[in-house]
């Protein structure tokens, strides 16, 4: 049975981290568009994984993750001040490259050779099926 308090807490943490990012003065975060894509918190509140993605691809995302990891204390203080938690989890930032993966798969699919309807109708194995 899923714990609804954890899912609510996860959304609250995601919202707080997202709203706190513009206050950071690091150039990797201030210059680029960094988005929190997902947050996972363990049931015992020991660990919190924050998945982030940056506009500009994998290298920008890695730089943003490093900058966010350095600012972990800032995020912990911000979360502690705004969200009532019995334990403050260890925050780990993880690069989320799912958008890059989606883009690569989309390019592969769009570049596949297409068959015209005339070729499909004139195929010998199709002619046998129609009789």
Image (tube, rainbow, N blue to C red):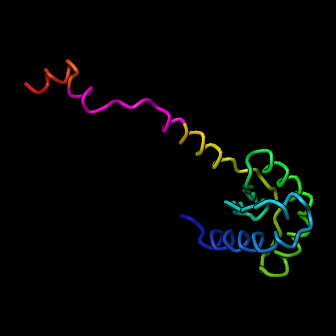
Locate residue 15, reporting x and y percent.
71, 73
Q: Is residue 83 magenta?
A: no
Indicate the position of residue 8 as horizontal and vertical percent values.
64, 73
Task: Write the residue at 60% across / 39% down.
Answer: 104
Is residue 119 in the magenta section? yes
Residue 127 coordinates in the image, percent (x, y): 15, 22
Up-down: is 97 above or below 3? above
Give the residue drawn at x 50%, y 34%: 111
Q: Quadrant of residue 40?
A: bottom right
Counting from the top left corner in percent of width and height, residue 97 is at: 69, 47
Horizontally, residue 11 falls left or right of residue 26, namely left
Query: Which portion, as a residue range, is magenta?
Result: 108-121
Does residue 27 appear left or right of residue 99 in this picture? right
| Relative depth, front residue between 127 and 65 | 127
Residue at figure coordinates x 14%, y 25% from the top left: 129
Q: Is residue 130 toward the left or the right of residue 17 in the image?
A: left
Q: Nearer the viewer, residue 93 or 30?
A: 30
Residue at (71%, 60%) from the top-left corner?
A: 42
97 shown above or below 19: above
Of residue 46 and residue 111, the one placed in the foreground of this image is 111
């Amino acid at each position: 049975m899923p714990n609804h308090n954890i899912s609510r807490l996860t959304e609250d943490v995601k919202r707080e981290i997202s709203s706190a990012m513009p206050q950071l003065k690091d150039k990797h975060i201030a210059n680029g568009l960094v988005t929190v894509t997902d947050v996972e918190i363990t049931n015992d509140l020991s660990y919190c994984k924050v998945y982030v993605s940056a506009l500009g691809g994998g290298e920008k995302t890695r730089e943003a993750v490093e900058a966010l990891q350095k600012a972990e204390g800032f995020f912990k203080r911000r979360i502690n001040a705004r969200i009532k938690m019995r334990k403050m989890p260890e925050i780990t930032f993880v690069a989320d490259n799912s958008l890059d993966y989606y883009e690569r798969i989309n390019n592969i699919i769009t570049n596949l050779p297409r068959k015209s309807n005339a070729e499909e109708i004139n195929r010998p194995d199709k002619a046998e099926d129609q009789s």
